[in-house]
């Protein structure tokens, strides 16, 4: 992705705080994941599911997930959260500061750019239009939560055509194929 303006080099000097947690309206709700109990077991189980594990490659042990969630919750780079639809958790998501992650080596990231990782946990809930319905609300909520953010990025595996179609239907545009650790990804962008 090419620089948008002559201000890009200046923007890299600006620091951004931790990524925000979006506030969604019904029928959606988002809340930060807890690193124990129900949340830990749910995130662990969903990441074991073949349709998630094939692309996320995080079918880790329960203790590894507990450690990962604790590290995310104690850090400033990533916020893990559960998205519920009509009160039922359906999506595990992570919002992150793109400039602080590996993706920043693949495009000219600005400090307030946000990145998203999304996974529909239950196979039975896929192909129902949940992601394409959620994304416009989620991006609006993230832009509102961080007024300095002008871009939100996704980086799905290029083989994950189901996710890519949902992301395009939800307002993201394909920008470029990029190499990330463990995958060839499609950089997708939603601008304010």
Image: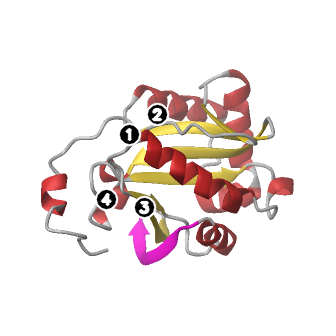
The image quarter containing residue 126 is: bottom right
User: Which badge, 2 or 4, is on the more N-terminal residue?
Assistant: 2
Instruction: Say which residue label 2 marks.
Output: 72
State the separation of the CA atoms marked 1 and 4: 13 Å
Question: What is the distance, in whole Å, between disc 3 and disc 1 at their CAs?
Answer: 18 Å
| Disc 2 to disc 1: CB gap under 8 Å | yes
Q: Residues within 10 Å of mark 4 (few under 14, many from 20)?
A: some
| Residue neighbourhood size for the residue with mark 3, other residues' Cα within 10 Å, grouped as few (<14), some (14–19), many (≥20) | few
Whole-number angstrom distance, CA of label 3 to CA of label 4: 12 Å
- Image height check: is 177 above or below 12? below
Which of the two marks, 3 or 1, is nearer to us in this view?
1
Q: Which mark is residue 181?
A: 3
Residue 42 lies, in percent from the top left, at: 73, 35
Residue 137 in view: yes
At which x and y percent is residue 115? Answer: 45, 53
Element under disc 4: helix
- Span colored in magenta: 171-180
Query: Residue placed at 23% from the left, 71% from the top?
Result: 3
Left or right of 50: which side holds 110? left
Q: For mark 1, what is the residue?
A: 77
User: Considering depth in this image, is 24 or 99 the residue closer to the camera?
Assistant: 24
Alpha carbon of mark 2 to alpha carbon of mark 4: how far? 18 Å
Compare marks 2 and 1 and give the one earlier in the sequence. 2
């Amino acid at each position: 992705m090419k620089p948008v303006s002559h201000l890009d080099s200046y923007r890299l000097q600006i620091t951004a705080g931790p990524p925000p947690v979006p506030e969604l309206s019904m029928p959606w709700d988002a809340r930060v994941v807890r690193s124990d109990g129900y949340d830990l077991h749910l995130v662990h189980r969903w990441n074991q599911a073949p349709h998630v594990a094939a692309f996320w490659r995080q079918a880790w042990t329960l203790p590894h997930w507990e450690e990962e969630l604790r590290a995310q919750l104690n850090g400033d780079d990533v916020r893990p959260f559960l998205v519920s639809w009509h009160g039922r958790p359906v999506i595990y998501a992570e919002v992150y500061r793109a400039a602080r992650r590996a993706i920043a080596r693949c495009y000219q990231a600005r400090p307030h750019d946000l990145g998203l990782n999304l996974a529909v946990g239950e196979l039975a809930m896929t192909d129902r239009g949940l992601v394409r319905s959620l994304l416009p609300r989620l991006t609006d909520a993230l832009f509102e939560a961080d007024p300095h953010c002008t871009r939100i990025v996704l980086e799905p595996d290029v083989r994950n055509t189901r996710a890519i179609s949902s992301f395009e239907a939800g307002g993201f545009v394909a920008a470029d194929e990029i190499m990330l650790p463990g995958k060839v990804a499609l950089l997708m962008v939603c601008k304010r």
